[in-house]
Structure formats: C-alpha cells, structure tokens
Amino acid sequence: MIRETYVHYVAAVYALAWLVTLAYVVILNSKLGRLERELDEIAGLLEAKADG
Amino acid sequence: MNTTSGARLDRATSAALVAAVLMPVALGLIFFYVPNDVDQGFSQRIFYFHVPIAMTTYALFAWGALNAARYLWTGDMGLDLRSYVPMHLGVIFGTLTLVTGSIWAKVSWGTWWYWGSTELNTFLIIFLFYCAYFMLRFSVEPGERRARYSAVYALLGVGLIPISVLAVHLGQDVIHPVTFTDRGANMDGTMLFTFLMALAAMLSLAVAMYLVELRGKRLDEQVTRLRRLAEGTR
Amino acid sequence: MSRRALVALVRKDLVLELRGSEVVLAMVAFVVASFVLFRFGLGGGRPAGGTRAATGMLWVAIVFTAMLALTRSFAREREHGIWDGLLAAPIDRALLWLARACSTCIFLVAVQVVALPAFWLFFLQDGPAPDYGVLVAAVLLADVGIAALGSLVAGLASAGRAREVLLPVLFLPFAIPLVLGAVSATTGTISPQTSGLHTLERLGYLGLYDTVFVLFGWGLFEFVVED
C-alpha cells in the first residue's frame, strides 16, 4: 500500500521541521556571539577608564 | 526577580525538557503506533506534524495580540517584547506551516498549492498580514511609538482572522468551482491521541523557544544600557 | 459640538482638495489608465475570461486607486504642520479618524463616478454584464471599509521611513478578503447567475467587514496620533 514517493514527501515534512529548529539554534548562537563581543568591548571601555 | 539561571530549573529549561520528552514520544506514536489512514494511507502522517505546527502558529499570534492589547492598556515596555517575540516565532512557524501544507497539497491533490482548500488560503492571508507587521516594525525607530504602532497593527489581525475565514468560505465560487470536503476530519481514538501528543510537543517547543528568545532580547537591552553607562562615565 | 467639529474637519479636507485638486484628478487618470492596461493585458479585442475576469480586474483597480488617496492621506498635514494644530484642539482623537475616513470615502466615490462609466465603456457595453445595482452597492460598501481601515493604517504608515511603500504593504493583506467578497458578490450576478441569496450574503459580508473595521478604527486611532 505504501507508495514509495509518498515516503519522500512525509520525510521532507519531518526533515523541514527539524531543520528549522536547528536553524533557530544557529541563529541564537550568532546572537550570543554578538552579545559576547559587545560585552568584551564594554569591559575594555571600563578597564580603560579605570586605568586612566 | 532572579536572573541568574545556572543549573536551576527555570521556566525555559522546564519547557525545553517537556518538549524533549514529548517530541520523541509523539514521533514514536506517529511512525510506530498509529495505523495508516484508510483513505490517504501513509502520507496522512504529514497531518500529525502539519496541523500542530499550524495551530502553534495561531496560538503564538493570539499570545502576541493579547500582549499587544495589554501593552496598549498599561504602556509597559516589557509587554511590547512579549508581543513582538511570539509574532516573530509565529512567522517562523507560519513559514513551516505553508511549506508543509504545500507538500501535503502535493500528496493529497497532486498540486503544490490547492486553491480550493479554505485552510491554506486563510492561512496565506494571515501569514501575509504578519509579514507586514514586520515591515512596520522594522521601518519605525525603536521606542515607545514603535511599540504603540506595532500593538495597534497586531490587534488589527484579531479582526482580520475571522473576516478572512468568512471571505475564503464565501469566495469559494471565485477561487474554486467545486465545493471542497475535508477528508481528514473524522479521527478515531488512536489518531486523536497521537495528534494531541504531537500538538503538546509542538506547543512546548514553541514555549521553550519563546522564553529563550525573550531572555535574549532582555539581555540585548541590558547590554545596550551597560554600553550607555560605560560610555557616559568616560 | 462634536458633530460641528466633524463637519468642519471634513469640509477642511474637501476645500483643500477643491483648491489644489491634487488627489482626485490623479486617481481618475490612474484608474482609467489601469483599465486600458487591463484591456490590453487581457488581450485587446476579445478579453480573455470575458466579463467575469474584467469584473475581477475592476476590484483590483479600485483597491490600487484607493492606495493613492491613502498615501496622500496624512501627507498634507505633515507637510504644512497642520497636524500639531489639530492635536492641540480639544477634539476627540476618534473624531479626527472619522473625519479622515469620511473625506477619503467622498474622494473614492467622486473618482468612481467617472471610473464606473469608463469601466462600462471599456468592458461591459457589449456582452453580459453584472447587475449594476449590486455592483454600485458593493462598490459603496467597499469604499466605507477601505476608508475606515485605510485611514487607520495610513496613520501607522506615516511614521515609517519609507511610508509610501509601507502603506500598500500594510493595507493589501486586508484588501484580500474584501476583494474576495466583492468579486464573489458581483460576478455572481453575471449569467449563469447564482441565487439572489448568494448575492445578499456577499453584500452582508461587505457590511460586516465595514462594521468590524469602523469599530477598530474608532477604538484604536487614539493610539496612532502623537500625544
């Protein structure tokens, strides 16, 4: 009964949902990276101020 | 308010844990427990993911609109974020709904977009509306006015949803000549159980993503505040 | 008191338009030109899809023409700094919206007085035609909805950076259900006809659309104007 092509379609749906979740993690990671850089910069600013 | 998380079980972590338990259970039920549909066979399994994703999208939009109304009522900027983040996630889930719906249309009706399906057409209108919400949000300067305008537009969506459902049903003679009957409407107990489990899994995933993204946005604001302080004290 | 303020506000818009006459004439030119475009787009001599397709096109033309009026909606106030004066006046904010919606509606009707005969001339004079009573009723009902919602959305768009582009983006999702109902109402009267009940239901839908967005406009406009 199972048509071979339909299996591909079903697999595509579940793979897409998985991919979107993964993409979300990647985007979150890039956001965290940006926050990290910004905090570094701010720390640098404060250190420069403390020294000077 | 405690903002340090660590290993403590905060709400985002618990939602993620619930999703982590429910998702494999749902997938197990979908592929190993529920029998093939009599009419549609194996391909009907798309339904157990597609429909929960669509419902999650609607739930996210509803939450966004509710917080928009609360924002207009109270003027609390935190509610602006709680309105924007679910809208943002709703557009992600909405894109996924359109793509999976398109695949289902291909399997069920042999075409990538079936204009006779009232669900697909309604969803398309509402999806376009929420994309427009982003155009508005990105073209207004951040601040109290952007929050107010976004909230007003988000609330207009509450009017648009029933209006669109009605229009698509009334306009069937324009979009498609024959009346469309839904084949997947009646479910037996096993199917309903599987479906509800998938819905719960998808909703808890969305809640986890919502809480994580909200925390990220708050972090953003705090960093901006810190930067202003650090530069100001120089 | 509030009725006098409303009349005064609408009269202000109409007098400005009569003196400068910048919007209505442009809309007439636009709508007639778009009929010509559609005529050739559908294949000149014998339009593909016949009267049905043409009637659908009419609604697209009406929505796009209304965009012109809405884009200019708050432009004059902004350019001449009238808005601050209006806001300083002790007028209910909702009344400002109502006045704007009324004058927009009047502009739309004025344009359609020319546009509908032109449409008949280009598309309907030979061959089957929709019921003209239904067509006019549907156009008037659609005008109210476009003006009510459009005045609110134009206010939102006027804050954006690319406001002329933003307005259609914000408005068109709402135009889809409107056009769907209106096309269904009007093409249903072209033979082979649907029942009178079908048409009545569609016109009722357009009335519901108006009611919903009049209420939204009335309730939400106070959040759109600056304090």
Image (cartoon, coloured by chain):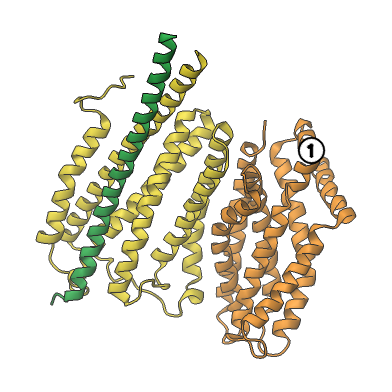
Left/right placement of residue C46 relative to residue B197 reads right
Residue C209, quarter of the rendered image: bottom right
Residue at (62%, 74%) from the top-left corner?
Answer: C57
Q: Residue furthest left?
A: B32
Left/right placement of residue A10 relative to residue C74 reads left
Residue A36, quarter of the rendered image: top left
Position of residue B52 measured from the top left corner of the image (x, y, whole percent): 28, 54
Examine the rendered structure and indicate whether residue C79 appears above or below residue C123. Answer: above
Examine the rendered structure and indicate whether residue A39 appears above or below residue B172. Answer: above
Residue C130, quarter of the rendered image: bottom right
Label 1: few (<14), some (14–19) or many (≥20) C-alpha neighbours in 10 Å: few
Which residue carries the number 1 mark?
Answer: C81
Chain C, which colour?
Answer: orange
Examine the rendered structure and indicate whether residue C184 appears above or below residue B17. Answer: below
Tally of marks: 1
Return the residue nearer the eye: C222 or B24: B24
Asked if residue C130 shows in the view, the reply is no
Residue at (20%, 64%) from the top-left corner?
Answer: A11
Residue at (72%, 36%) from the top-left corner?
Answer: C92
Q: Chain of mark 1?
A: C
Chain A, which colour?
Answer: green
Tell me the quarter of the image containing the N terminus of chain B. Answer: top left
Q: Residue furthest right?
A: C19
Asked if residue B184 shows in the view, the reply is yes
Return the residue nearer the eye: C133 or C52: C52
Query: Helix, strand or loop at disc 1?
Result: loop
Chain B, which colour?
Answer: yellow
Position of residue C139 measured from the top left corner of the image (x, y, whole percent): 68, 67
Inspect the image, locate mark 1, and give the three-letter code of the amino acid beneath it.
Gly
Position of residue B225 measured from the top left corner of the image (x, y, whole percent): 46, 22
Position of residue B186 measured from the top left corner of the image (x, y, whole percent): 25, 66
